[in-house]
């Protein structure tokens, strides 16, 4: 029995997984002030509430983790720094536990049940609160030597000295512009009113200038970042996921134009860019299969 858990920072969701489907699932909110030990207790309790004795559990977290399951840093929960998450959950549940970054886990689900069946090498980009990346090369998940692989959100897209600061401590990272905060800031600069990405998407879908110009700016920075990756890796496909990926048809032309500017060979700019159809549970599904690798 495979069980996956998705920890977003604000919520915990666990599911019994069969193929790409969740047979049963449960979730709970995590208070911002909760200590790591309390969150891991709640996680173990949530898994037990599914009523199964798991053979293995996989956990997706919103940060980086080394191959042994020790957390490097969670931007939204600083107290998790250095916590051996896999070991701690293993002690609580008495079974093997694998831990990975959320986008990397989602890329594994995509490899097994989504576009990864057609494309051997692809980068999954999640466009949500942050900008995450998960890389699969030649059908193999590539988390990186130390768990920092494919962090496209921290690729520099603005090298000017006054570029806005990123949560990672550097300036000009893609996430500053393409993460929710940057997108909503741009939306507001163009006269849009809203605090959620869905409002930006709806505005663009209605043909309003605020939404369309916001997506145009998103296309420019995202295209610049993907072009750099193409120059390095030469992928079979780029897969978009997350709340803003559903608007891809509205910014596809802009993204493709930027790709043509940023790649050194014309073929690299023609990489298929597709939208994931696995939905919100992809990190749970991918996490569950981590233990099978
Ligand atoms: Zn950064």
Image (cartoon, helix red, strand yellow):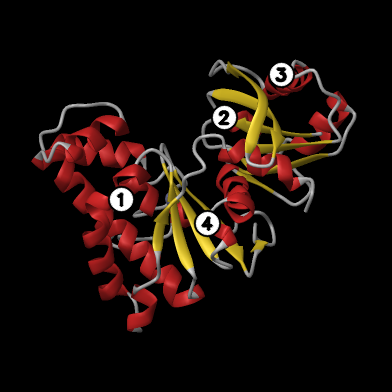
Residue highlighted by disc 2: 77
**Mark 1 C-beta closer than 8 Å to ligand 1:** no
Query: Of callouts 1 and 4, which one flags the residue occurring earlier in the amino acid sequence?
Result: 4
**Mark 3 C-beta closer than 8 Å to ligand 1:** no
Q: Position of residue 293 (x, y in %)?
A: 77, 53
Is 182 situated left or right of 271 in this image?
Answer: left
Residue highlighted by disc 4: 115
Q: Which of 151 and 171 is in front in this view?
A: 151
Binning the other alpha carbons within 10 Å of mark 3 as few (below 14), some (14 to 19) or many (20 upward) gives many
Residue highlighted by disc 1: 248
Circle nearer the viewer, 2 or 4 = 4
Binning the other alpha carbons within 10 Å of mark 1 as few (below 14), some (14 to 19) or many (20 upward) gives some
Query: Of callouts 3 and 2, which one flags the residue occurring earlier in the amino acid sequence?
Result: 3
- Cα–Cα span, label 1 and label 3: 35 Å
Query: Of callouts 2 and 4, which one flags the residue occurring earlier in the amino acid sequence?
Result: 2
Q: For numbered disc 1, what is the local secondary structure?
A: helix
Residue highlighted by disc 3: 46
Q: For numbered disc 4, what is the local secondary structure?
A: helix
Residue at left offset 65%, top offset 65%: 139
Occupied quadrant, residue 31: top right
133, above or below 271, in the image: above
Query: Of callouts 1 and 3, which one flags the residue occurring earlier in the amino acid sequence?
Result: 3
How many numbered marks does the figure carry? 4
Residue at left offset 41%, top offset 57%: 274
Q: Where is residue 201 in the image (x, y as percent from the top left)?
A: 25, 37
Q: Position of residue 257 (x, y in %)?
A: 23, 68
183, above or below 172, in the image: above
Q: Which of 145 and 82 is in front in this view?
A: 145
């Amino acid at each position: 029995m495979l069980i996956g858990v998705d920890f977003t920072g604000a919520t915990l969701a666990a599911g019994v997984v069969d193929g790409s489907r969740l047979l049963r699932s449960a979730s709970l909110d995590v208070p911002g002030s909760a200590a790591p030990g309390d969150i891991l207790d709640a996680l173990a309790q949530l898994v037990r509430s599914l009523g199964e004795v798991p053979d293995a559990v996989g956990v997706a977290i919103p940060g980086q983790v080394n191959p042994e399951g020790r957390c490097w840093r969670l931007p939204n929960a600083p107290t998790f720094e250095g916590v051996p998450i896999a070991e701690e959950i293993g002690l609580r549940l008495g079974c093997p536990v694998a831990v990975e970054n959320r986008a990397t886990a989602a890329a594994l689900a995509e490899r097994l049940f989504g576009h990864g069946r057609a494309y051997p090498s692809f980068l999954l980009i999640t466009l949500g609160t942050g900008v995450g990346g998960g890389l699969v090369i030649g059908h193999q998940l590539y988390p990186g030597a130390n768990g920092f692989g494919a962090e496209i959100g921290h690729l520099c897209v603005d090298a000017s000295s006054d570029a806005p600061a990123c949560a990672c401590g550097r300036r000009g990272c893609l996430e500053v512009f393409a993460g929710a905060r940057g997108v909503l800031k741009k939306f507001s600069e163009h006269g849009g009113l809203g605090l959620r990405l869905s409002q930006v998407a709806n505005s663009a879908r209605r043909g309003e200038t605020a939404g369309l110009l916001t997506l145009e700016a998103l296309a420019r920075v995202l295209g610049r970042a993907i072009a750099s990756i193409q120059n390095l890796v030469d992928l079979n496909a780029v897969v978009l996921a997350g709340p803003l990926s559903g608007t891809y048809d509205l910014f596809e032309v802009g993204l493709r134009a930027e790709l043509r500017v940023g790649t050194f060979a014309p073929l690299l700019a023609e990489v298929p860019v597709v939208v994931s159809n696995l939905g919100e549970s992809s990190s749970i599904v991918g996490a569950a299969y981590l233990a099978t690798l």
